[in-house]
């Protein structure tokens, strides 16, 4: 690529390294702060066996039992895409 397009700034990137944890973005840090505060406030308010999360842009506390016993349908077109791209 570098030889064919010398005007472009090219680099080799190993996707696995990015997937294992690239630098957090501003929105990653904001979300982490929001969820961290929510977790502490939940504990201070006596909540137990729940996790803090964002659902429909709203902070929610979800009981662990709901997440353990609830099944989510996997989108088969996404699964096909994963199979194709993982080659």
Image (cartoon, rainbow, N blue to C red):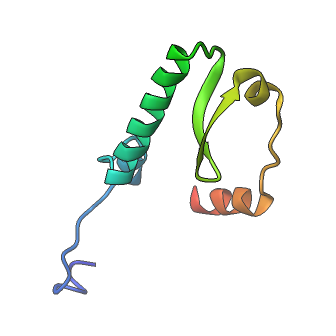
The x, y position of residue 79, in whole percent, is: 72, 56
Q: Residue at x 77, y 21 (%)?
A: 65
Q: Residue at x 78, y 28 (%)?
A: 66
Please identify the quadrant where the C terminus is shown. Answer: bottom right
Picture quadrant where residue 4 is located: bottom left
Q: On the picture, is 63 further left or further right than 31?
A: right
Q: Residue at x 64, y 63 (%)?
A: 84
Whether 72 is drawn above or below 47: the answer is below
In the rendered image, the residue lying farthest to the front is 45
Picture quadrant where residue 31 is located: top left
Whether 82 is drawn above or below 47: the answer is below
Q: Residue at x 56, y 17 (%)?
A: 45
Q: Is residue 34 visible?
A: yes
Q: On the picture, is 11 further left or further right than 41?
A: left
Picture quadrant where residue 1 is located: bottom left
The x, y position of residue 59, in whole percent, is: 58, 41
**Number of marks:** 0
Q: Is residue 87 visible?
A: no
């Amino acid at each position: 690529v570098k030889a064919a397009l010398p005007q472009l700034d090219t680099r080799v990137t190993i996707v696995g390294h990015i997937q294992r944890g690239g630098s957090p973005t501003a929105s990653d840090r904001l979300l982490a702060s929001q969820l961290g505060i929510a977790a502490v406030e939940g504990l201070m308010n006596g909540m137990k066996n729940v996790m803090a999360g964002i659902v429909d842009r709203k902070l929610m506390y979800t009981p662990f039992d709901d997440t353990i016993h609830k099944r989510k349908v996997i989108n088969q077109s996404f699964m096909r895409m994963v199979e194709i791209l993982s080659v």
